[in-house]
Image (cartoon, grey):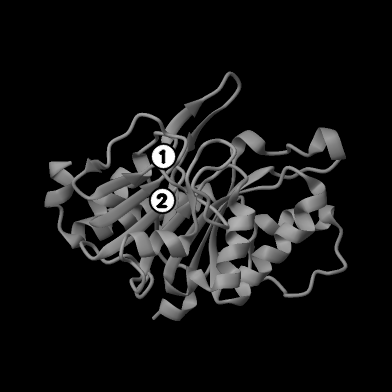
Amino acid sequence: MDRWRQCSLVSFICLVLVGFHQQEQLLIAFQSSSHLKSNHGNLTWKEMLPLFSRRDSSACRTYFEFGGVINRLSSLTFLDGQKSVCLDPGVAPTPDKCVVYSFGNNGEWSFDEQIELYGCDVYVFDPSVWHWKRRHSKKILFYRVGIGEKDDERNERGWRIMTLTSLRRMLNHTDIVIDYLKMDIEGGEWPVLDRWLIDGDLSRVKQLAVEIHLENPETIPGKYQLIQRLEATGFVRFFSRENPFTTNSYLDKYNVSGPGCLELAWYNTKFAQ
């Protein structure tokens, strides 16, 4: 940790460039695309499925993946939990001046701790973590609260749930810009994202990273429309990665290949330079 803190910004950028080159090599198999067309109303859910994996490969010149732990399964080993952050001018978090909201933690701190070392104040929210303390480290605060589409002091699981607007108010962050907002809440992201778009909550968010879940084919058209609504507000999808554990999860049941879970990341073009 001390070594990280002593690095100059120039040194960190050099590390980022190396990481970016390596990541580009790893992602070369993924399909690049320009911005998605706004009208896909005539497509079936099977035709929509590959569109979730597309990204604009030219949108972000330099990005870096923060965090991640090795996940070892009986038939598969892969890195999990890392999040892609665009470091282009305007949208890049400014070291020692950046704010990160991290929804969904499950006791795995690799992303939160590494983005802290970059220089961000990190606010972590997860109602499912039982063993916790408010101040995890110097710049990381933890709240046993979940993100939701409405406030609920005690939901069916006994969890306290708050909207983004309410959380901002609680933290006296009503007018600040959130440099990076990460959401990994195991399928609960869709109603939350819908609420954010209705309320305009993302207008003061520079970057957004969401792990999306596509388990039910009947819901895919509505989920794709939500993605289109998000991107119509000016968010550009610069990163996409299928969760290796869910690759081809539809193949056996529905005779179509495709992931059940993806990591997507966008930046808000209103901040781009």
Give me the residue at 58% from left, 18% from top.
74
Quadrant showing the C terminus: bottom left
Whether residue 67 is situated above or below residue 210 in the rendered picture: above
Per the image, label 1 sits on a secondary structure element best described as loop
The image position of residue 98, as x and y in percent, is: 28, 63
Residue position for label 1: 68
Q: Residue 195: which quarter of the image?
A: bottom right
Please name the amino acid that badge 1 sits on.
Gly
Q: Residue 254: which quarter of the image?
A: top right
Separation (CA) of disc 2 from disc 1: 14 Å
Q: Which mark is residue 15?
A: none
Q: Is residue 143 left or right of residue 214?
A: left
Per the image, label 2 sits on a secondary structure element best described as strand
Quadrant showing the N terminus: top left
Q: Is residue 56 left or right of residue 106?
A: right
The image position of residue 243, as x and y in percent, is: 59, 41
Whether residue 209 is situated above or below residue 135 in the rendered picture: below
Give me the residue at 41% from left, 78% from top.
271
Residue position for label 2: 102
Give me the residue at 18% from left, 46% from top.
138
The image position of residue 220, as x and y in percent, is: 76, 54
Q: Nearer the viewer, residue 73 or 175?
A: 175
